[in-house]
Image (spheres, rainbow, N blue to C red):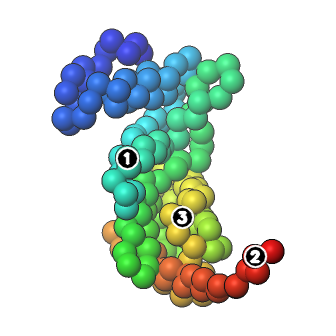
Amino acid sequence: MDEDDFNFDDFFGFDEDFAKIIKKLMSSAFNNIDNLGEPVVYGINLRFDKDGKPIIEEFGNVKNMPGGTKISDIREPLVDIIEKDDELEIVAEVPGAKKEDIKVSATQDYLTISAKREAPETKYFKRIKLPAKVDPSTAKAKYNNGILQVNIKKKESKAEGKEIKVE
């Protein structure tokens, strides 16, 4: 697939540099694929951080590796992170998985999601760097109709000051 196959002029009203980034991601994602008989899931998630800076993340089972692109048997789910004043809400798409086959773990910096579905067999895995430190003991997860929602409280920053003597 060639960059010229895409028409990204005025792509969603973004500037030309952004369109070039998307073109490069899309064309490199399908460069020299070895195992094209496998199902291909590839997408780009565009979101903005709290300062308005765009964050572009790829998801799916297409992996760029030295020597070409591979189709992995593990799919990265589409994930969205909603940052609220005192908590993070992480929403992940894991269609076809059963609630009992989903595993979620958290540290103060990362959230890890793994799951599987039976037919057709699909494995999901994603390790997410969180935009704020969190308290893992407050995490709550719900799963309904292929959507996993995890809410976790931000860790209170206890900025302890210390007077520094000037010499």
Query: x and y percent of residue 122 in the render?
Result: 53, 51
Residue 8, by quadrant, is top left
The reply to whether discs 2 and 1 touch (Cβ–Cβ < 8 Å) is no
Q: Quadrant of the N terminus?
A: top left
Q: Which residue is mark 1?
A: 54
What's the amino acid at mark 1?
Answer: Pro
What's the amino acid at mark 2?
Answer: Val
What's the amino acid at mark 3?
Answer: Leu
The reply to whether discs 2 and 3 touch (Cβ–Cβ < 8 Å) is no
Whether residue 85 is situated above or below residue 73 in the rendered picture:
below
Residue at 47% across, 54% down: 77
Mark 3 packing: few (<14 Cα in 10 Å), some, or many (20+)? Answer: some
Residue 134, by quadrant, is bottom right
SS of the residue under disc 2 = loop
Query: x and y percent of residue 4 in the render?
Result: 33, 12
Distance from disc 2 to disc 1, alpha carbons, whole Å, reads 42 Å
